[in-house]
Image: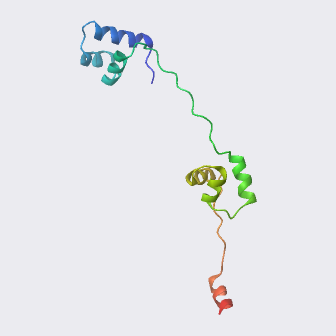
């Protein structure tokens, strides 16, 4: 939550004018640590935060890679894309791609090998 500049100025002027920080907390409804932070800075304007950068992993490229190489393991895909294996697993979940297990009839396989 961003506090208005007007409120910030009122709180700082109250404390610098002789008011106690604890009474400013109750009076203005602002946290004590916030007041200390405002008192230690010269500029009371809120900081502008940038959005996080785009994800490193291209989901469509991953989807094409899975179609081309269906048996590849997550760690091998991770080294191909230059990310951590956990990132591959999460991206595959986002794409709703699951590991397909081979159906085997173990009784018939045991008879054929005997």
Quarter containing the N terminus: top left
In the rendered image, which quarter contains the C terminus? bottom right
Q: Residue at x 72, y 47 (%)?
A: 60
Q: Can residue 29 be seen from the camera position used here? A: no
x 26%, y 17%: residue: 21
x and y percentages locating residue 29 in the rendered image: 33, 19
86 above or below 50?
below
The answer to whether one can see residue 97 in this image is yes
Q: Quadrant of residue 76?
A: bottom right
Residue 44 located left or right of residue 50: left
**Residue sitting farthest toward the bottom:** 114
Number of marks in the image? Answer: 0
Image spot of residue 61 (x, y percent) = 72, 48
Given residues 40 and 102, the one toward you in this image is: 40
In the image, is residue 75 above or below residue 112? above
Residue beneath the point at 60% across and 58% down: 75
Indicate the position of residue 4 as horizontal and vertical percent values. 44, 15
Q: Position of residue 14 (x, y in %)?
A: 30, 9
Coloring applied to the structure: rainbow
Answer left or right for 31 relative to 107.
Answer: left
Name the foreground residue: 12 vs 106: 12
């Amino acid at each position: 939550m961003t506090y208005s500049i007007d409120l910030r100025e009122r709180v700082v002027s109250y404390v610098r004018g002789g008011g106690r920080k604890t009474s400013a907390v109750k009076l203005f409804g602002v946290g004590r640590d916030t007041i200390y932070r405002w008192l230690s800075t010269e500029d009371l304007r809120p900081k502008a935060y940038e959005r996080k950068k785009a994800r490193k992993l291209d989901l469509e490229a991953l989807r094409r890679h899975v179609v081309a190489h269906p048996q590849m393991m997550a760690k091998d895909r991770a080294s191909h894309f230059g990310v951590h294996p956990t990132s591959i697993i999460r991206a595959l979940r986002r794409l709703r791609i699951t590991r397909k297990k081979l159906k085997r009839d173990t009784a018939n396989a045991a008879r054929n090998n005997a």
